[in-house]
Amino acid sequence: MPGSPEARSPYALLDEVERARDVLVLTYTTSLEFFERFALSDARALGALVTVVSDATMVRADPVVVRRAGVHYLDARAVCPGRKAFHPKLFVVVGEGQARVAIGSGNLTMAGWHGNAETWTVLRADEDGGPETLAAVSAFLRRLADSDVALSAAAPDALRRVADELARLPADQPGPRLLHSLDEPILAQLSPMDSAVDELMLYSPFHDGQLDGLRALLDHLAPAAWTVFVQPDTIVDGPALQALADERGGRVAWVSRRTNGDDGKSSPDERYWHGKVAQWRTASGETWALTGSPNLSRPALLERIGAGGNCELALLSRIEHDLTPAEGDPPIGGLVSLAKPGADRDWHHGPVLLSAVAVGGGVTVELHRALATDGTFERYDIAADRWTATASGAAGSVQYTLDVAAAPVGHALRLRTVDGGLSNEVFVADPARLRRRQQQAIGKVRSAPEDVVRDGLGSQLLADIDELRAHLLAVGATVRIPRPATPETSEDETGTELPVPRPAPGQTLEEFLEACDPVLGQRMTEFALVLPALPGVGAALDDEVGTLDTDTDETSARQDEGGQDGPGGRSIRDELNRRTPDERRRYRGFVERLVARAPSYPMVVRTLAVRTLLHSIAAHLWPDDEWPPLLAAALRALGAVGDEPRPEEETAAGSLAAVGLALLRTDVPRMSVRDERQMRYASAASAVAALLDCRDAQQVEMLAAELPGRLAGPVGAQAAARAVDEVMHPPRSVDRAVRLLAEEHDVDAHTDGDATVVIDEPLANVPEPMMVIALRLTDEAGPVFARGETAEGRPVLAAWCSPWLAVERVGKTGMKFGRAWRLGKGQTLHAIDLMTELPRADARWNAGEAPPEDIRDLLATADEDWNGNRADGTR
């Protein structure tokens, strides 16, 4: 157990073993989104079957974002008699001759496993031995499986399986004493002290309304002196607590809101203290601690299951260190400001679903109690993003069978009654898939993308990626098909080239993510596929501010101002901005190697390369003149020939292509100038053009938020839309000229018919350069025309039809005059020097003179086009 309560996560225990048979979590409140994003992948990579058992009505799960419940892990629910809280906090990793067990105070939420100050005791065992506490944990799990606690259908078997795994390990060494409330109250299991208690320290985030839990503990231990700590979020009757302290010779103290860092400096500490602890020192000099899940309340300490008590789990330990929190000053308002507990925990109004299990072509739905009134089952339709009525349920039963089409595996299900009640949500489970173990991890990294930056794992990640294609083929996620014969390939040569990997038929996204997991890891794969780009993502994975009703311990996951981040809380850009120049230089080398190799990798790695590069550009990893070639290469890799992609890979590639083009477009000052920048952009755009139709608007928004500088956010999404339109619907001829005049020359113009550009602004005294620019921007061989007027209102006409360029103006007298230039064979208007003085004309005509015959015909065509448009009403 740590020396003081801190945000210490059981998640770290997953890194201590290489293989396991089972991972089990018992918890009160659960955020399945948090669990799936930050722990499930590592748990399954051990080869373990994963089970989470939560209080039935205290599970939060966005049904769009949660994808693996009931498929990759058992999301089990528990209901205690009298609807009291299922409140134990237990984490077990067991199998392959070893075990790691954590017993503490944290819920399976971002707050409980990261943000709060919690107390955890970690027990370790292997084939050489372990603490005898593990035998008690095994016995507790068996007892829970057979207790009055109502559990989801498959949960008792999972509990017994984990109990059997723990029982196989030798557990003969001294360890803490395990206490639980299945058979008798927690407090009744505290033996009388062999020596008088000199000093008692207490902390709990919740007290019952009458302070019964605190009073009973004081009566049992009879300390000579005692202190109870509170903080501004503690749920307790503050004045009553002070009165009890005055009456019983105690003291109320406040947890400090500051902490001392490694450098000895004090800084604000806004963590929520959620750890429960009772610590006492005896006259004989021993220090004891009661830690775990129980709050200082009657249901937690004084009652057993079935007699008004919660299901609680605690440890009684003799310790060598002090768990007393640092003491601080009281806030304004003091104890009076604390929120008083309610009468009981928030009641769930409506039926309680325990499970929905696919069995024999149907889905069996189990309720905690018989349905009192008729109701309608609703499933969450992910495609429509809404709940949909799917089947009826008549009153009077605890079990219903639905068609699998009405309750698809992995989808959320709930029940609405005719009297307005609404059940909790459960996810439809597939027992066959739950029994399927994942292959042992192959990749050494398998971390979040930002962790690669922080820990310098780039070279190892490249080595992992080299294993991906072979692994996907080995597990059947992709299959080989012969390359189609080309006209240059003889019949004898067909099939001699390396076959093309194609996605396995019928494979779901979840199965593909599972297949990638052993090599890339879940978070890296989701990052590469721009997942989850769905409603609910980006919101807190955890607790709302606020509510601690009697014996609930739901807390808020505060991020302190000092920048404490949750798992995955920083992006690649954030981490790069914190790195030293040498670290940034090493990561830059990794990204450059990743982009260089990308064309030979599966699509999921190509998308990973582009998204990683976008973050790195946003962190200014390269000077402004060095990243465009790299981005263009990464985009070209997206469109390169290779493995056939899955639809989700194509969607991610299309979204990344759109956003990448928007960024690369900023490096092209003029699309009309065929220089290195323009040709680089055109090459990248051509490579990804076929992918752009696959883009997803929500993914584009997510990616645009990661862009650098002024392009970040909605501006970037709009720029992506423009880039896509420019590539997929490129303007041609006079339409192209009008757009480029505006974008590159800040000149307003419009089209007149299919062949004429009309300049809307007064022309200069020497109008020929602007007219030539307008014609040149059409990128046509002609005939095309440009018209405008000088500031004095005199018309100017320019005409181009290779090889002739002619400009005719109206003079002060109203007579026309002009000049014409004959270009060499194959020359375009790019050969004309757009200086104020044009080259010497090959033909000219003064006022009253007729132009040469070829020019006369060209100008006549311009007049016919102009007059014809007016005659047919187009202008």
Image (cartoon, helix red, strand yellow):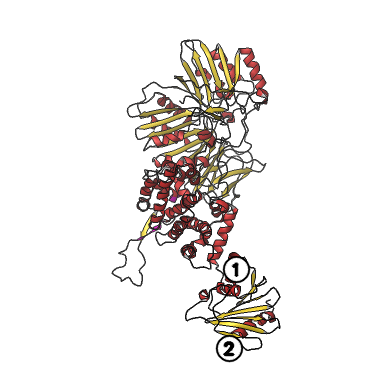
Q: Is residue 500 magenta?
A: yes
The answer to whether residue 57 shows anywhere in this view is yes
Residue 749: x and y in percent read 64, 70
Q: Is residue 63 above or below residue 678?
A: above
Question: Within 10 angstroms of label 1, few (less than 14), some, or many (20 or more) residues?
Answer: many
Q: Is residue 69 visible in this depiction of the protein?
A: no
Horizontal side, residue 761 vs residue 104: left or right: right
Q: Using the numbered discs, state the Cα–Cα distance from disc 2 to disc 1 in whole angstroms.
A: 31 Å
Q: Residue at x 41, y 54 (%)?
A: 595
Q: Position of residue 767 (x, y in %)?
A: 62, 75
Could you say whether the residue bearing mark 1 is in a helix, strand or loop?
A: helix
- Is 154 positioned to the left or the right of 874 in the image? left
The circle on residue 852 is 2
The total number of labels drawn is 2
> Disc 2 vs disc 1: which is toward the camera?
2
Query: Within 10 Å of the Cα at label 2, are there few (<14), some (14-19), or many (20+) other Cα atoms?
Result: few
Asked whether, in this view, residue 585 is left or right of residue 771, the answer is left
Residue type highlighted by circle 1: Leu
Q: Is residue 134 left or right of residue 269?
A: left
The circle drawn on residue 143 is none
Q: Give the quadrant of residue 796.
A: bottom right
The x, y position of residue 294, in whole percent, is 54, 25
Instruction: Pick the residue in front: 681 or 346.
Output: 681
Viewer-side residue, 395 vs 258:
258
**In the picture, which quadrant includes the N terminus?**
top left
Task: Determine which residue is flagged by label 1.
Answer: 741
**The residue tagged with tag 2: helix, strand or loop?**
loop
Span of residues in magenta: 499-512
Classify 231 as above or below 537.
above
Residue at 60% in and 68% down: 741
Percent from the top left, x then y, of residue 9?
A: 47, 33
